[in-house]
Amino acid sequence: MQKRWANLCLGTTLLSGLAIACACTMDGERVSVSELRTESKTVALGAAKSVRINIDMKAGELKINPGAPQLLDANFTYNVPEWQPEVRYAVQDTVGSLDISQSRMGSVSGNTRNEWDLRLGKVPTDMTVSVGAGRATLALGGLALNSLEVNMGAGETTVDLTGSWKKDLVARIQGGVGKATVRLPSDVGVHVTAHGGLGTINAGTLHKQGDVYVNGSYGKSPVTLRIEIQGGVGEINLEMGGPPPVV
């Protein structure tokens, strides 16, 4: 197992603070560090009544928070020109599709930065988030999520689901290499199905019922969060209660 862990870690680079020491080769192309730039992007909801959001970040630091007065308020900070994110939005039959992606990575060394700070509006949403190498803090409790899928690569990820929920949620979290923390509300029913993979899953104060973990509000509250977690190589921690973190 130690050999497999070492082989997996050789192909990835984790963040230290806000910098990426060395990004992995994704497409075989060499890219260069340039001046640091920050770009802002806003997207209006338009005629959409619900949205599908897909976020795909190859490497860097990702933050997602609620609170945008429209669909998206975003700041992107990076110092490799090829890492400029692509933001696309379209509406069809009152359903919006928002895609935020980093299409190119390349091979680069030096003090690189790639940071996405995204604020999202409160509209019925089906969301998929994929993070390659780095750090992700996803504060999602203030959003109107119908479904959620999180695919983690290498690094540290926090998925915060504390907060007020008006409707049920179905979520799937795929673990990677590193550490993941899933923060869960105590006053909303929580039903977690967890599979360990090669890593470990720490259920905290959740109660085990057969093959699932539940909190004290499960079966009592009108709303239920149903979460399926597939562990990877690393550690997944389930934490209960408390206010959402300040990010």
Image (cartoon, helix red, strand yellow):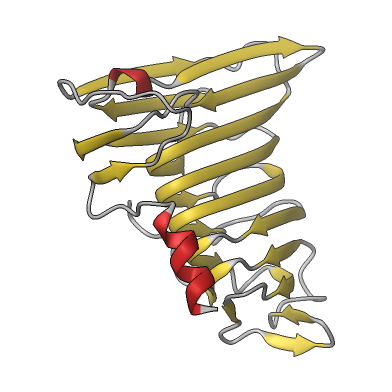
Q: Position of residue 6 (x, y in %)?
A: 44, 68
Quadrant position of the N terminus in the picture: bottom right
* For residue 124, side relative to residue 63 (left or right): right
The structure residue drawn at horizontal position 37% and vertical position 34%, both measured from the top left corner, is 116
Pinpoint residue 53: horizontal percent, then vertical percent: 63, 31
Residue lying at 68% horizontally and 80% vertically, measured from the top left? 215
Image position of 92 (left or right of 21): right
Q: Between residues 89 and 113, which one lies in front from this camera angle?
A: 113
- Residue at the (27%, 44%) spot, across then down: 20
User: For the point 66% across and 39% down, which residue is it?
Assistant: 127
Percent across and percent down for residue 34 are 18, 21
The image shows residue 116, relative to residue 94, as above or below, that is below
Q: Horizontal and vertical percent for residue 4?
A: 53, 70
The answer to which quarter of the image holds residue 199 is bottom right
Q: Nearer the viewer, residue 143 or 176?
A: 176
Q: Is residue 18 above or below residue 55?
A: below
- Residue 112 visible, this orientation: no
